[in-house]
Amino acid sequence: MAQRACFVALIEGRRTLERQQWLYAQGRTRPGPKVTPCDGIKTRSKHQDGIAADYWARTKDGRVYCPGPLSPFWEEFAACAAKIKLVTLEKKGDFDHIEMPEKSA
């Protein structure tokens, strides 16, 4: 079987409460589209706990870009994440997000 490689760049990992609230304000009290449903207090982001991260694509020469939602890159990204037991949220439209899976009871 051929070895797969995903060329990615970490965009954001662990977030402080202040950063989470700043992102939550976007599309609510700051201009722009809403980017998160988590306010950081009532609803915490997994980024705040250090178990989620956002990635974009990286070309072989190092250029970083965010592919569109229909790009085949995201399918490959999800496959690479699954190989190392990480979960993506592409089915919820959050293509660049990966996180640790929920713990089994």
Image (cartoon, rainbow, N blue to C red):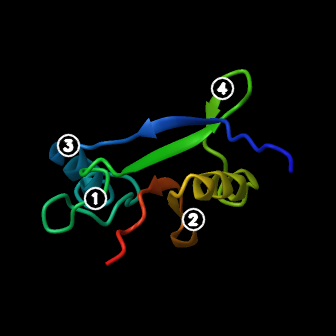
From this viewpoint, which residue is outermost toward the top?
A: 61
From this viewpoint, which residue is outermost toward the bottom?
A: 105
Real-space CA distance between mark 1 and mark 3, rounded to the nearest whole angstrom: 10 Å
Real-space CA distance between mark 3 and mark 4, rounded to the nearest whole angstrom: 27 Å
Residue indicated by mark 1: 45
How busy is the neighbourhood of tag 1: few (under 14 within 10 Å), some, or many (20 plus)?
many
Residue toward you, 82 or 44 = 82
Residue indicated by mark 4: 63
Q: Position of residue 96 (x, y in %)?
A: 53, 52
Q: Quadrant of residue 38?
A: bottom left
Residue 10 drawn above or below residue 71: above
Query: What amino acid is labelled 3 in the image?
Result: Thr
* Mark found first going from the N terminus, 4 or 1: 1
The secondary structure type at the circle numbered 1 is loop
Name the residue located 66 percent from the left edge and 47 percent from the top edge. Answer: 67
Residue indicated by mark 2: 90
The secondary structure type at the circle numbered 3 is loop
* Mark found first going from the N terminus, 3 or 2: 3
Query: What amino acid is labelled 2 in the image?
Result: Glu
